[in-house]
């Protein structure tokens, strides 16, 4: 008797195909996924990927489909003024179904590389959500190892509201950390450039040398250390700070001093 084997793809009917057009608005993709039974939908994004100082911050967020009007105008955090980012941050904190933030110290970024640290942070941010998502949207590149079906969306922080929300959570959290770091080390001007490679930041690096918050995987940081005769630390293991709904600068300072670990 012949045994006929068939793949799951052949046995199960495919769901009807959905066409999502960019001009449909930032809530269209999330709405389509909900209608297909794939909700709740989480968005994930990061802040600080290109900075040469300070942590990398990753956030995940699940929004209510009914909040499109309340969050009208929400977009990529980089396109918003500081005041508008704070406005949306407060709304998101108050109205989101679930949110999670992971803070990754500079030493972790140096050891594993920014992309690997970012991907791991995204996994932890999604795992830290109080509500398990039915689908995850990431900004720009695929993230293997997530605990739900997922899709990379080009310019996701501009075309998917939940990714925009994650970008705001990550950006505001990181900016607060950098302002707090500035209070203890005003010579670097972290409150202005937030650790990115500006002319002013490079000048302060050359004048004072790097501190423990700088990323030695950046050439300008290594050059500044050597110019002042300072040792360049070898890559050392550090722990991702715990995922949580909201991070304060004080939490970051405590964890950097050894008060928090996830490993």
Image (cartoon, rainbow, N blue to C red):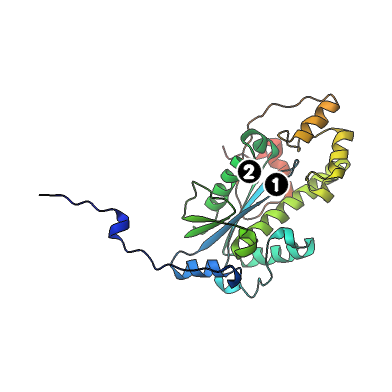
Residue 95 screen position, x and y as percent: 62, 68
Residue 244 screen position, x and y as percent: 61, 52
Q: Is residue 235 above or below residue 125?
A: above
Q: Which residue is mark 2?
A: 241
Question: Circle 2 — which element?
Answer: loop
**Depth check: 212 or 32 in front?**
32
Q: Could you tell whether 189 is left or right of 87 in the image?
A: right
Q: CA distance from mark 2 to mark 1?
A: 9 Å
* Label 2 vs label 1, nearer the camera: 2
Question: Circle 1 — which element?
Answer: helix
Q: Residue 186: give its label.
A: none
Residue 39 screen position, x and y as percent: 48, 65
Q: Which residue is mark 1?
A: 251
Q: Is residue 214 above or below residue 228?
A: below
* Residue at the outermost left position: 1
**Depth check: 95 or 85 in front?**
85
> Dots 2 and 1: beta carbons under 8 Å?
yes
The count of marks equals 2
Bin the neighbour count of mark 2 within 10 Å (Cα to Cα): few under 14, some 14-19, many 20 and up: many
**Depth check: 118 or 14 in front?**
14
Q: Could you tell whether 152 is left or right of 86 in the image?
A: left
Residue at 16% across / 50% down in the picture? 3
Q: Check the picture and name the quadrant holding the C terminus.
A: top right
Bin the neighbour count of mark 1 within 10 Å (Cα to Cα): few under 14, some 14-19, many 20 and up: some
Residue at 69% across / 26% down in the picture? 234
Residue 38 screen position, x and y as percent: 45, 64
> Mark 2 or mark 1, which has the lower sequence index?
2
Q: Is residue 37 above or below residue 239?
A: below
Residue at 61% across / 73% down in the picture? 68
Residue at 63% across / 50% down in the picture? 58
Q: Could you tell whether 208 is left or right of 162 in the image?
A: right
């Amino acid at each position: 008797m012949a045994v006929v084997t068939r793949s799951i793809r052949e046995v199960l009917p495919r769901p009807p195909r959905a066409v999502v057009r960019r001009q449909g608005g930032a809530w269209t993709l999330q709405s389509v996924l909900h209608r297909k039974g794939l909700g709740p939908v989480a968005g994930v994004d990061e802040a600080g990927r290109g900075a040469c100082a300070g942590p990398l911050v990753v956030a995940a967020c699940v929004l209510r489909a009914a909040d499109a009007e309340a969050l009208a105008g929400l977009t990529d955090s980089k396109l918003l003024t500081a005041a508008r980012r704070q406005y949306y941050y407060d709304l998101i904190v108050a109205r989101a179904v679930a949110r999670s933030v992971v803070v990754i110290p500079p030493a972790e970024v140096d050891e594993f590389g920014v992309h690997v640290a970012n991907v791991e942070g995204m996994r932890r941010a999604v795992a830290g959500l109080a509500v398990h998502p039915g689908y995850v949207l990431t900004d720009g590149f695929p993230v293997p190892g997530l605990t739900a079906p997922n899709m990379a969306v080009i310019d996701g922080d501009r075309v998917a509201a939940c990714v925009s929300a994650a970008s705001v959570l990550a950006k505001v959290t990181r900016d607060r950390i950098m302002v707090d770091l500035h209070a203890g080390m005003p010579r670097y001007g972290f409150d202005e450039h937030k650790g990115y490679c500006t002319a002013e930041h490079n000048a302060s690096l050359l004048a004072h040398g790097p501190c423990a918050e700088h990323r030695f995987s950046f050439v300008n940081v290594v050059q500044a250390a050597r110019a002042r005769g300072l040792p360049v630390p070898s890559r050392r293991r550090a722990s991702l700070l715990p995922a949580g709904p909201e991070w304060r600068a004080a939490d970051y300072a405590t964890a950097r001093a050894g008060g928090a670990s996830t490993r």
